[in-house]
Image (spheres, rainbow, N blue to C red):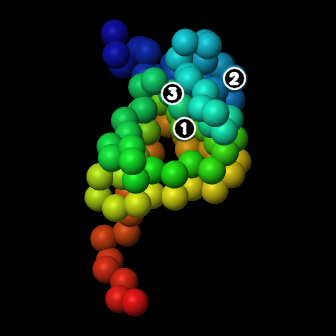
Amino acid sequence: MSSTSSSSSSARAGGASSGGPSEYFETATGNRICRKASLYGTQNIRIHGKSLVAENVTIRGDLANVKMGKHCCIRDSVVLRPSMKVVKE
């Protein structure tokens, strides 16, 4: 069952436009987040507006701050995490 649904969902074009209204939720700034996305450390994740986070995306805000600009499209099966390199200021 999962291999059939994942192959059909990854073959879809258009991301959020092909999903039903219950598959995504919209934030106050117009971001559309898939309910199947994994967000860790949400207090450290900043998405600045009108962005799309598709299914099976993992955003690791538990490691450090993660910031995204406006009009970003994060497609299927992407992992966003902060750099592991420590920057000295």
The percent position of residue 73, horizontal first and vertical second, equals 62, 44
The three-letter amino acid code for the residue at tag 3 is: Cys
Q: Which is more toward the observer, 27 or 86? A: 27
Residue 40 sits above or below residue 84 on the image: above
Q: Would you call the spot at circle 2 few (<14 residues within 10 Å), some (14-19), or many (20 or more)?
A: few
Q: Quadrant of residue 24?
A: top right
The three-letter amino acid code for the residue at tag 2 is: Ser
Q: Which is more toward the observer, 40 or 56? A: 40
Residue where numbered disc 1 is placed? 53
Quadrant for the C terminus, please.
Answer: bottom left
Residue 13 visible? The answer is no
| Mark 3 or mark 1: whose residue is earlier in sequence | 3
Residue in the picture at 42% in, 25% down? 36
Q: Which is more toward the observer, 48 or 55? A: 48
Disc 1 to disc 2, C-alpha distance? 12 Å
Q: Which is more toward the observer, 54 or 6? A: 54
The percent position of residue 29, horizontal first and vertical second, equals 66, 39
Residue where numbered disc 2 is placed? 17
Q: Name the mark on residue 8.
A: none
Give the structural element (helix, strand or loop) at label 3: strand
Residue 31 sits above or below residue 9 on the image: below
Give the structural element (helix, strand or loop) at label 1: strand
The percent position of residue 84, horizontal first and vertical second, equals 31, 71
The three-letter amino acid code for the residue at tag 1 is: Val
Q: Is residue 48 left or right of residue 78?
A: right
Residue where numbered disc 3 is placed? 34
Q: Are marks 3 and 1 in contact (CB under 8 Å)?
A: yes
| Mark 1 or mark 2: whose residue is earlier in sequence | 2
Residue in the picture at 34% in, 9% down? 1
